[in-house]
Amino acid sequence: MKFRNRLSKYLLGVLIGLGLAYFISGDKSWSWLPKNVIRAEINKKGVVMTKDIACKLQCNEIDYKNVKEVIATGYLNMPKSGRQENPRWYRFESEGEIQSMKVVLTDSTSTITEVNLVNTKDCDC
C-alpha cells in the first residue's frame, strides 16, 4: 500500500472518530472540571468576608454582586492557589474593579481574606 493511500485511510478514520465523539458527547456539561467544581463548592457554602475586607470594599463602593461576579467569571489561578494546604485557598483574578482576591474554604464557609483593587481609596479600616 502506498503512503498516500494509508494516509487517506488514517485521516478518514480520525474524522469518523471525531464525528462520533462529537455526537456522543455533544450535549454534555463541563461541570466536572476542577475549576467548575471549586466554583460550585464556594457558591454552595456561601461567601463571607472579614470585617477589614468588607470595610475596604464598602469604602471603594464595590458591592457583593461584584464579588460574586469575580467568583463566577474570573480566572481561577490554580498555580498561585494553596490547594494542598489546610484550609484550602484559591486565588481569583479579574480585569474589573477587583484585580484579585483570595478565598479560603473551610468546612462550612468560604471566606474572602484578601482583595487587591485597581483603584484604592484611603479608608479608616
Image (cartoon, helix red, strand yellow):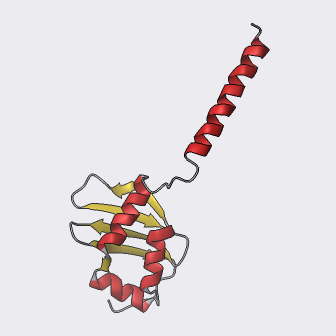
- The residue lying at 45 percent from left, 61 percent from top is 76
- The residue lying at 22 percent from left, 71 percent from top is 108
Identify which residue, 60 or 13, lies in the foreground.
13
Most extreme residue toward the top is 1
Image side of residue 5 versus residue 31, left or right: right
User: Where on the picture, by quarter, is residue 51?
Assistant: bottom left
- The residue lying at 33 percent from left, 70 percent from top is 44
Instruction: List x then y, in percent, for residue 124.
Output: 34, 92
Instruction: List x then y, in percent, for residue 64.
Output: 42, 84
Identify which residue, 47 or 84, lies in the foreground.
47
Q: Is residue 78 visible?
A: no
Image side of residue 124 versus residue 25, left or right: left
Where does the N terminus fall, quadrant-wise? top right
Mark count: 0
Instruction: List x then y, in percent, for residue 119.
Output: 51, 82
Identify which residue, 120 or 23, lies in the foreground.
23
- The residue lying at 47 percent from left, 90 percent from top is 61
Q: Can residue 123 be seen in this view?
A: yes
User: Where on the picture, by quarter, is residue 122?
Assistant: bottom left
Identify which residue, 74 or 122, lies in the foreground.
74
Residue 114, compared with residue 26, is above or below; it is below
Image side of residue 121 versus residue 106, left or right: right
